[in-house]
Amino acid sequence: MTGATRGIGQATANCLLDLGAEVLAVGRDAVRAEETRRAWEHQKLPGDVVVADVTTELGRDQIVAAVADRWSSLDTLVNNVGEGNRKPFIEVTDSDIDHLVSLNFTSTAILLRRLHPLLQRAAGASVVNVASTAGLVSVPDTAIYGAQKGALIQLSRSLAVEWAPDRIRVNSVSPWFTRTPRIEALLATAEVADRIIARTPLRRPAESEEIASVIAFLCLDASSYLTGQNLIVDGGATISGIS
Ligand SMILES: NC(=O)c1ccc[n+]([C@@H]2O[C@H](COP(=O)([O-])OP(=O)(O)OC[C@H]3O[C@@H](n4cnc5c(N)ncnc54)[C@H](OP(=O)(O)O)[C@@H]3O)[C@@H](O)[C@H]2O)c1
């Protein structure tokens, strides 16, 4: 599972470990990775962390090698890495575009292709790609990020059909604003928090655990007939008209 040393990814890894899964987490920061690994070891949970950057070929090589070293087949793959940069479109630089496309789409597409042989060897596998409501509706200053998340949702649908003969289910999850380290500062800005709350029928952002439990559901046999779907976890935001 990529991006599992913080935020939604870490909450998902914890949820899957509680459900009895073995988890291999991916993160970039070595210190945070070691803290995560030690916390799981302390709780006697079968979780480990590989330090790798999904946007580099070397990082993807390290991830594929670490997975293949541990398992001859892969039951579950959660692609959770993703990030925007909150700039109006006309201020986005060429290198911003390259980075956002690489981080939010290309890295996941390449990992999916490279891990397919291991997924194919499982007796039924589940892939969950973490997208965003920004891939469905306009969220200010996230045009490139939203476009890549929209692409990830469609990639998930296409692969759900293409990989169904291999008994690999592919779904995506699209969170709305969720309390994680990445957006803590944004949510602490009263004006932004008020706008989010006003726009959200449940009148609050999500907690990471509320996204994690939906991702975990898609990993379980409990969702065995669900594929090619995008589960929107948004407190009702995208179905709300005027309030
Ligand atoms: N939070 C929200 O409001 C929200 C809303 C909609 C969608 N989402 C989506 O949900 C997912 C998780 O978001 P989050 O808010 O939980 O993020 P977060 O708190 O920033 O955590 C991101 C995780 O990904 C890892 N990571 C980042 N870049 C990486 C890279 N290049 N290679 C390997 N690992 C990397 C981080 O580890 P290091 O720090 O060690 O790199 C960390 O473990 C993302 O796809 C995001 O787009 C979030």
Image (cartoon, rainbow, N blue to C red):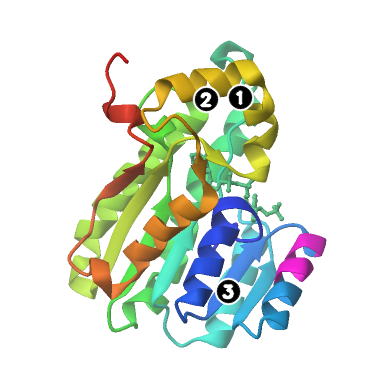
- Which residue is disc 1 drawn over? 86
User: How far is the residue under mark 1 from the one under mark 2?
Assistant: 6 Å
User: How far is the residue under mark 2 from the one under mark 3?
Assistant: 30 Å
Q: Which mark is residue 24?
A: 3
Q: Residue 50 lies in what quarter of the image?
A: bottom right
Is residue 9 found inside the magenta-colored segment of the image?
Answer: no
Which residue is painted at 28% across and 57% down in the image?
A: 159
Image-based side of 68 in relation to 169, left or right: right
Which residue is painted at 60% across and 63% down in the image?
A: 60
Does dot 2 land on a helix, a strand or a loop? Answer: loop
Q: Which amino acid type is marked by label 1?
A: Arg
Q: Which amino acid type is marked by label 3?
A: Leu
From this viewpoint, which residue is outermost toward the front?
Answer: 203
Q: Is residue 201 above or below residue 55?
A: above
Q: Quadrant of the C terminus?
A: top left
- Which residue is disc 2 drawn over? 142
Q: Nearer the viewer, residue 86 or 6?
A: 6
Q: Which residues are magenta?
A: 31-36
Does dot 3 land on a helix, a strand or a loop? Answer: strand
Q: Is residue 236 above or below residue 191?
A: below
Circles 3, 1 touching at the beta carbon (< 8 Å): no
Image-based side of 142 in relation to 7, left or right: left
Residue 102 seen in this snapshot: no
Does dot 1 land on a helix, a strand or a loop? Answer: loop
Q: Is residue 72 above or below residue 107?
A: below
Q: Position of residue 194 (x, y in %)?
A: 54, 19
